Image (cartoon, coloured by chain):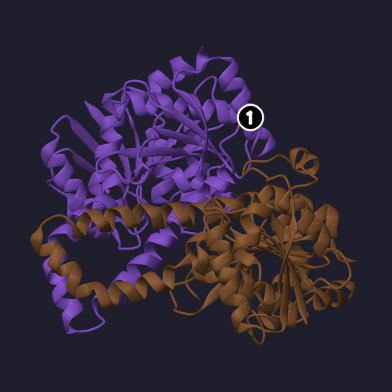
Chain colours: A purple, B brown
Amino acid sequence: MVRLAIDMMGSDEGPMPLAKGLKAFLKENDDVEVVAFGAGKDLHPLLDGVRGASVVETSQVVPMEVSPLGFLRLKDSSMYQAIKASAGVGFSGVVTAGSTGGFVTGATLLIKNAPGVLRAGLAAPFVTAIRGKKTVILDIGASNQNTAEELVGFAKMGSLYAKNVLGVQTPRVYILSNGVEEGKGLAESVKAYRILKESSFPGFAGNCEARDALDGNKDVIVTPGYPGNILLKSIEGTAGMLGVLLKKAFTKNLFTKMGYLLAKPGLKGMKQTLDYRSTGGAILLGVNKVAVKAHGNSNDYAFYNALKVAYSMAVSSIVGKITEGMAK
Amino acid sequence: MVRLAIDMMGSDEGPMPLAKGLKAFLKENDDVEVVAFGAGKDLHPLLDGVRGASVVETSQVVPMEVSPLGFLRLKDSSMYQAIKASAGVGFSGVVTAGSTGGFVTGATLLIKNAPGVLRAGLAAPFVTAIRGKKTVILDIGASNQNTAEELVGFAKMGSLYAKNVLGVQTPRVYILSNGVEEGKGLAESVKAYRILKESSFPGFAGNCEARDALDGNKDVIVTPGYPGNILLKSIEGTAGMLGVLLKKAFTKNLFTKMGYLLAKPGLKGMKQTLDYRSTGGAILLGVNKVAVKAHGNSNDYAFYNALKVAYSMAVSSIVGKITEGMAK
């Protein structure tokens, strides 16, 4: 039985879409039980009588832009309580759509790092130019700066994730840099390169430039958190800008509109490939439980996918495998 | 009279397209003279008899991935000689399509920083979601790390560029960060924020996340070189990936192909908005002459635009204005 603690109050859209995604997920997986944390008046009507779901009432909600200290003061928030519960015996992990900062603070302090993990890394699977092929990038913002040794830890954890959860035999692992040659990049990345090379790290394939990150030929890309966050957000920003321009292009006149209608089946496939909601959000690798952060503007489908990610992580025993791998 | 030193050997495509762009540029601007550096056997047939052009023969070519030391050893290369010449009396500046590393090393050492400039910054105008509206981002890779004081210098130089060359009355200046609130981001960026705020820097508008960098509402975005380079390349990479997916979408079947044909006029406008060749490449702000780095895969149109950028910079006396502004 997989038991998950769920923060129901984290979405910009309120608990309704999360409950819808949760119900769809529970219907498909009868080996799952969840404890849902949030406002009783919202959750009881949505979840009472749903197989596998129980509600724990909390009185506070963590705002999106919470500081670490601010988060720690909100002890009766749905996020704090869900993370705390997930750290207990019998729970596999936690899922939230709330503040990334609160999530990282809470998971690090309440669940704690697995033995041998210097720093937990926030990872996300990115869609690429190859349909169905995902690239895991970490850290995308749990830290700002990371040491070479932490980067090596990210390489190990990312590789274990790609192997055990995504099913890649020998994941190809890269270091994000501003040039492919050895010696290019930040001092800590250059040092991490040397350590991975000298230890013959399985699948280590050198540096990767940001422009090639999404070509579909990489399984794992390792970076300190600050540039990782810039990478994540500039991908989002560029995709958003192109979406705006594409819309303008198609609505230029009657003919372009007709063109859109004809091309729609192809464009739909493209949209599916790009749909970030299908990736289920970000995961914090290196803590003692499964910890999944769904997108803040999660609809039911996005939250359903985040729950599926948590479930795959739980059944693949990724936390145990990371603990084992990091002890080596 | 504007006199420019031109490195003719820097393009992946050879000197031919550069010469074509150069000739078109000289035809339009009879107040310009250029000295073209490169292999005599290539350049004489292309440029002899062209009004305003003279050739200086050089024997070496700087490879794309040159190290700073490697560059300094290639003293008879077209790039070294062009940069060196541009530092002399009577020259306004230099244009090259060659190695960015060689260009930055050469410009910094041979042309030298203007008085009061702690660090030259590599800047590029980016196309945005608003047609015709460019955002200048610096540094995009002259340095890896920068101090807060260097970032403040970038803010000044970027603002002077946007005002004097792009014609923006009071440029809106942002600091790239991983959150919009004051206090978010790298230590040096947080400090630069404080300095700009406390000095009431004209147009300073706070932090900007990478996802909003290209929304068209920013004139200048300041960042240390390493994350700036990640930003630049992930924009390129994401745009490239979406281009691949879009092509797949339109070639899915006969109907999508017809759709493409109908939508083409709209898509063409989009392509023009996105055409990086129209921006003319990157510029090194803070050295004593105009220094423009055209795209390495420059065609004639891209190189023509790079020359136009150098010309606008020369006639706007941006170097003098930066020297003046930085002394304040």
Instruction: Kindly tell me whether residue A300 is visible in this rendering.
Output: no
| Residue most extreme to the top | A328
Task: Give the image location of residue A269, x and y in percent.
Answer: 18, 54
| Residue under the point 60% across and 69% down | B306
Q: Is residue B102 left or right of residue A85?
A: right
Q: Quadrant of the N terminus of chain B?
A: bottom right
Q: Is residue B196 left or right of residue A155?
A: right
- Up the image or down, B88 lies above or below A169; here it is below
- Up the image or down, A328 lies above or below A41; here it is above
- Up the image or down, B292 lies above or below B241; here it is below
| Residue under the point 12% across and 46% down | A49
Given the image, on which type of amino acid does mark 1 rest? Answer: Ala
- Up the image or down, B209 lies above or below A4; here it is below
Quadrant in the rendering for residue B287: bottom right
Q: Nearer the viewer, residue A17 or A253?
A: A253
Number of numbered discs overlaid on the protein picture: 1
* Residue that mark 1 sits on: A148
| Residue most extreme to the bottom | B169
**Element type at marker 1?**
helix
Label 1 chain ID: A
